[in-house]
Each structure stands twice: as C-alpha cells, then as structure tokens.
C-alpha cells in the first residue's frame, strides 16, 4: 500500500517528521474495530507474512507498507487487505501507541543523523531547492512534542482515497485480487473533489555553484562530479521508454568500464557512474571516486579528465562494442534471475512506475529491445548522447574528506586540483 505524501507534505508548523511517525504508529495503534488491541496489525499480520527487512518506509514523497503472505490463499490476502484498510482509515492514535512510536522514530533518526547530515549537505550543493533539500534530509524535530491532534490531522489529510494505491504482486488471478480490493476498499470514496496536486519544488539551477566540499570529521572520502536536470516527461510509448532505458544502461556501462580501466587495481565499487531518474525529484548523472586518505587531488583530477575527454572525444569504437557485449550479458543474467526477484521489490517498483506514469519493463523485455537496438547504435550515437545529456545540466564538483578541514581555502584547492595544467580552456572549473 502506497500513500502519496511523505516529508514534502509536512508543510504546516509542527509537522516535521510526522509522516514517518504515522508509519510507525500504524504498526502499534489499536483500530476502531479493536480499540483495546495494542500492536493490532502485527498481531494479525505477522503470523501470515514472510519475514522482511522492513514492513514500512517513508521518503520525501510517499509512505509504503509491505506485507507478503506465506501462501497464495485468497483468505490470507483478504486478511492483509483488511489490515491495509484499517491502516488507511481506522487508526485510533491511542496515547501509548503514539508514545511507543515516538521513541522508535527518535532512536532511528539518531542512528541516521550523520548520514542525513552528509546527504543534506550533498543535496543542498548539487540540487538546491529540490525536495530533498527543502525537507532537510528527513528533519524530525517535531516528533517528540507533536500533539495527538496534530498527528491525527496530518493522517486525515494524507490518508485519503485519491492518495492511496494498492499493488498486489504474486501468483494470484488479477480478477480475484481486484474483487478482494473492491470488497475492502469499494466503500471508501472521496468525500469532496480532489484538491489540485501542488507541484513538487524543483532544483534551483541558478543556485548551483561549480564546487562544494564537506569536511565532517566522521564523514566519507569521496569525489563526485554531477549534473542535475529536470525529471524527463513521462515517455510517449513503451518503446520510447525502453530505448531511453537501454541508452542509459549502455552509457553507464561504457563510462564504468573507462573509469575502472584507469584504476585497474582498485577494488570493486571504488569508482563508477550512476544515473538516477526522478526518485530524488530530478534526474542526475554522477561519477564518483571513493578515494583513500590523502589522495583526493588525484581523484578529482581523474574524474574531471574523464568528463572533459568524453565531451571532447566521446567513446571509442572498442569501448562502445565492449559496453554492448557487457550490457547484453548483464541483462541476460538479470532475466535469468527474474524468478527469484522478491515480490515486495517488484510491487514497490511497480508502484513507483505507476505513480510516475511509466511502464515497469522487465529485464527480459529490455534484453529484446537491447538486441534490436545494438546494430543501430554506434560509438558516435553514444558520444552524442553524452554531450547532450551532460551539457543539459549544471556540472558540480564535490569533494568530501575530513582532511579538507586542515586547508585554509578548500574551494580554491579543489579548483586547482581539477584544472591542473593540461585542462582545455573550455573544461576548466570556475
């Protein structure tokens, strides 16, 4: 079950962190039909469900609840759907359930404080004004003190029919699953016309600076070159989406191969490239180097030289041919592993695709598209893709390392390391 409206919906005073708090309360609170039953959802649901790393999550734009039945029996599915209906409509917010949940969220956020601080600083640099910048990396300052009336008010504002989605994945017949959903949720109708969906904030291109740094004593050591651009419009067809996904995968494989070839003795994951397409509120392309203590200058120079060379010369024919072979192998492996995919993961991916008006294209179908595209896609088309995509965003160089605290002017030092002596004039960091 997906609820549209996570941290970004907490726009009234005193609501910071309450969407996450409600997620926890759902697992503790009695419901209208069982007002004395603490941990109602867990007592009824856990005996029917498979163990899972987590059964709920809250992000900037949504809260998700995940339950997997141990069997394919329709009665078990019906019981879990009934729990979802109670979660969406019947929470009592009894004081002891709310207080237990406050403690859980406060402990969870304390454990994540360093990571959230690092992430908040990073997002503020590469995508200022975007959702994850505006919400300050899951700020939960109001969780300890918010009144039950305030919490209940946000719940009623968010948990409404037009903001909910039920996704069922598994060995069930679609018409039978639909009938069960209608049985449990069919009488839950909007009481008023749906309000116009407020536009999510977008990043402020004019506020992105060429260089930023972090020198937290317990922070990570990484150099990142990133471009951020608006999230693309929904694809016009399944075919156009598949082509775009295959090109993203091809270029990612080609750049990853180049980065690893430049550091052949480095451990897996030290360097790489990643494309994130909308999950954070924007599309971003990122190259990274997780360098060792004291080697940040070389990491910066290497990443910057790579992006400059790709802009100037593009991919070689050999690089592109190898990337094609690698991608076909990767997709074939992913297709072979499809039967072992977790239904919960598939349901989550499907909910995101539906919310974004995209298709969820499985690996075997992507493999067929890739095989059809390969003869038509050469190094020149890959290089053109790179220049168009990389050039459409604002490039940002970020370095995170505790040793930067010992440097009087880290920004100037980073710029000098990036520009070196061989950089082309048009590729220098300002």
Image: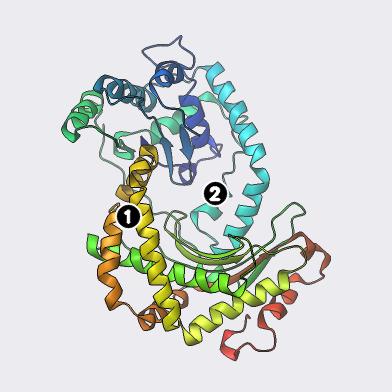
Whether residue 428 is visible to the viewer of this picture, yes or no, is: yes
Q: Residue at x 73, y 76 (%)?
A: 412
Q: Which residue is mark 2?
A: 135
Q: Residue at x 63, y 42 (%)?
A: 112
Which x, y percent locates residue 231? 39, 62
Which x, y percent locates residue 338? 34, 47
CA gap between label 1 and label 2 equals: 34 Å
Whether residue 386 is visible to the viewer of this picture, yes or no, is: no
Residue 269, labelled with which disc? none
Using the image as rendered, state which of residue 13 and residue 32 is in the foreground. 32
Which quadrant is home to the N terminus?
A: top left
Q: Is residue 393 above or below residue 99?
A: below
Which x, y percent locates residue 86? 36, 22
Q: Is residue 33 above or below residue 376?
A: above
Colour theme: rainbow
Q: Is residue 152 above or below residue 139?
A: above
Which residue in the rendered view is the most extreme toward the top? 36
Which quadrant is home to the C terminus?
A: bottom right
Which x, y percent locates residue 283? 44, 63
Using the image as rendered, state which of residue 284 and residue 290 is in the foreground. 290
Hey, which quadrant is residue 98 in on the image? top right
Mark 2 neighbour density, 10 Å: few (under 14) some (14–19) many (20 or more): many
Q: Is residue 326 left or right of residue 312?
A: left
Mark whose residue sits in front, 1 or 2: 1
Q: Residue at x 42, y 37 (%)?
A: 64
Determine the secondary structure under disc 2: loop
Mark 1 neighbour density, 10 Å: few (under 14) some (14–19) many (20 or more): some
Which residue in the rendered view is the most extreme toward the left? 175
Q: Which residue is mark 1?
A: 363
Determine the secondary structure under disc 1: helix
Q: Is label 1 in contact with label 2 (beta carbons under 8 Å)?
A: no
Say which label, 1 or 2, has the lower sequence index. Answer: 2
């Amino acid at each position: 079950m997906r609820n549209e409206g996570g941290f970004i919906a907490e726009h009234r005073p005193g609501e910071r962190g309450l969407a996450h708090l409600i997620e926890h309360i759902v697992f503790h609170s009695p419901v209208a039909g069982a007002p004395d039953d603490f941990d109602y959802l867990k007592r009824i649901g856990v005996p029917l469900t498979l163990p899972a790393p987590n059964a709920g999550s809250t992000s900037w734009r949504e809260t998700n609840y995940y339950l997997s039945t141990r069997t394919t029996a329709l009665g078990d599915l019906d019981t879990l759907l009934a729990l979802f209906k109670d979660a969406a409509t019947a929470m009592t917010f009894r004081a002891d359930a709310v207080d237990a949940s406050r403690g859980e969220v406060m402990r969870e956020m304390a454990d994540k404080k360093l990571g959230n601080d690092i992430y908040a600083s990073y997002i503020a640099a590469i995508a200022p004004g975007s959702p994850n910048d505006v919400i300050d990396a899951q700020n939960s300052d109001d969780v300890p003190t918010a009144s039950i009336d305030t919490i209940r008010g946000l719940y009623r504002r968010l948990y409404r029919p037009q903001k909910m989605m039920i996704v069922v994945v598994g060995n069930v017949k679609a018409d039978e699953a639909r009938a069960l959903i209608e049985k449990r949720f069919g009488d839950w109708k909007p009481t008023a016309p749906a309000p116009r969906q407020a536009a999510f904030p977008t990043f402020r291109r004019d506020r992105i600076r060429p260089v930023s740094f972090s020198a937290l004593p317990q922070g990570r050591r990484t150099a990142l070159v990133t471009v951020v651009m608006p999230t693309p419009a929904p694809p016009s067809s399944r075919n156009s989406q598949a082509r775009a996904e295959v090109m993203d995968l091809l270029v990612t494989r080609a750049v990853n191969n180049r980065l690893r070839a430049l550091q052949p003795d480095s451990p897996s994951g030290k360097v790489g490239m990643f494309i994130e397409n909308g999950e954070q509120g924007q599309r971003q392309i990122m190259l990274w180097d997780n360098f060792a203590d004291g080697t940040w200058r070389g990491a910066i120079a290497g990443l910057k030289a790579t992006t400059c060379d790709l802009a100037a010369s593009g991919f070689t024919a050999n690089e592109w041919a190898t990337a094609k072979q690698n991608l076909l192998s990767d997709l074939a492996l992913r297709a072979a592993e499809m039967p072992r995919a977790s239904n919960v993961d598939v349901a989550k991916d499907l909910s995101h695709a539906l919310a974004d008006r995209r298709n969820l294209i499985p690996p075997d179908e992507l493999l067929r598209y890739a095989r059809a595209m390969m003869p038509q896609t050469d190094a020149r088309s890959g290089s053109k893709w790179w220049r168009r995509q990389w050039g459409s965003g604002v490039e940002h160089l970020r370095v995170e390392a505790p040793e930067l605290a010992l440097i009087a002017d880290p920004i100037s030092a980073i710029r000098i390391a990036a520009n070196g002596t061989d950089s082309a004039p048009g590729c220098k960091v300002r």
